[in-house]
Image (cartoon, grey):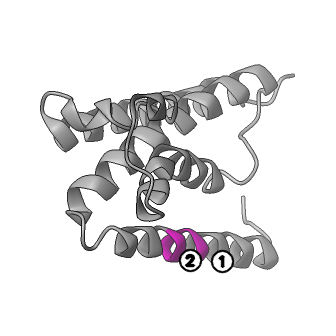
């Protein structure tokens, strides 16, 4: 199966856009241990997004639309308290509603654990796509 040229171009543009957005978010953390904070909130947010994507794909029997947008939105939700912090609002317990913003930093194994969780969520989404999106006779 060959994709139409316009579809390939659109996919490439979405990938570039995702890289630009995530590059900007990474740069936003440059003064606050960028690798640790960016990865923590990316893996946590993207993992939740992949779980939701899996549920939607399972229910609808088709892949979600704009699949690169979902992890970016999950990342933005997970890091939202840090945007508030940059605006002068201190971290508080209620900020846990943003995908466990504070507690994600204290998981055993830190980012290695979050990477494993992310990979498991990605594997689940791909498995759902493989099994549920098969055309029905």
What residue do we see at 39% from left, 36% from top?
Answer: 92
In this figure, which residue is indicated by the disc labeled 2? Answer: 16
Q: Nearer the viewer, residue 40 or 59?
A: 40
Question: Where's the C terminus, which quadrant?
Answer: top right
Q: Nearer the viewer, residue 12 or 93?
A: 93
Kindly give the residue lying farthest to the left in the view shown: 109
What residue do we see at 44% from left, 30% from top?
Answer: 96
Task: Provide the secondary structure element on which disc 1 rests.
Answer: helix
Task: Provide the secondary structure element on which disc 2 rests.
Answer: helix
Where in the figure is residue 87, as x and y percent of width and height? 48, 63
Where in the figure is residue 28, as x and y percent of width and height? 39, 72
Instruction: Tell me, yes or no, whether the highlighted magenta stretch contains residue 105.
Output: no
Q: Residues within 10 Å of mark 2 (few under 14, many from 20)?
A: few
What residue do we see at 70% from left, 30% from top?
Answer: 57
Question: Where's the N terminus, which quadrant?
Answer: bottom right
Left or right placement of residue 50 versus residue 63 in this view? left
> Is the residue 15 above or below the residue 1 in the image?
below
Where in the figure is residue 127, as x and y percent of width and height? 52, 28
In this figure, which residue is indicated by the disc labeled 1? Answer: 13
Q: Most prominent secondary structure in the magenta stretch?
A: helix
Mark 2–mark 1 contact, CB under 8 Å?
Answer: yes
> Is the residue 71 above or below the residue 8 in the image?
above
Quarter residue 55 falls in: top right
Quarter residue 86 falls in: bottom left
Quarter residue 58 falls in: top right
What residue do we see at 71% from left, 79% from top?
Answer: 9
Left or right placement of residue 32 versus residue 16 in this view? left
Q: Which residues are magenta?
A: 16-21
Left or right placement of residue 13 versus residue 3 in this view? left
Q: Residues within 10 Å of mark 1 (few under 14, many from 20)?
A: few
Where in the figure is residue 133, as x and y percent of width and height? 72, 31
Distance of label 2 from label 1 (alpha carbons) = 5 Å
């Amino acid at each position: 199966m060959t994709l139409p040229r316009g579809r390939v171009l659109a996919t490439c543009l979405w990938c570039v856009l995702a890289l630009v957005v995530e590059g900007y978010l990474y740069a936003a953390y440059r003064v606050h241990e960028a690798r640790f904070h960016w990865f923590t909130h990316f893996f946590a947010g993207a993992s939740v997004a992949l779980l939701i994507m899996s549920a939607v794909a399972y229910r609808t029997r088709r892949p979600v639309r704009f699949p690169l947008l979902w992890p970016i939105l999950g990342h933005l939700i997970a890091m939202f308290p840090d945007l508030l912090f940059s605006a002068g609002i201190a971290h508080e317990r209620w900020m846990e509603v943003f995908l466990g913003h504070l507690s994600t930093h204290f998981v055993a194994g830190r980012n290695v654990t979050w990477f494993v969780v992310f990979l498991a969520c990605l594997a689940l989404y791909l498995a759902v796509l493989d099994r549920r999106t098969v055309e029905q006779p």
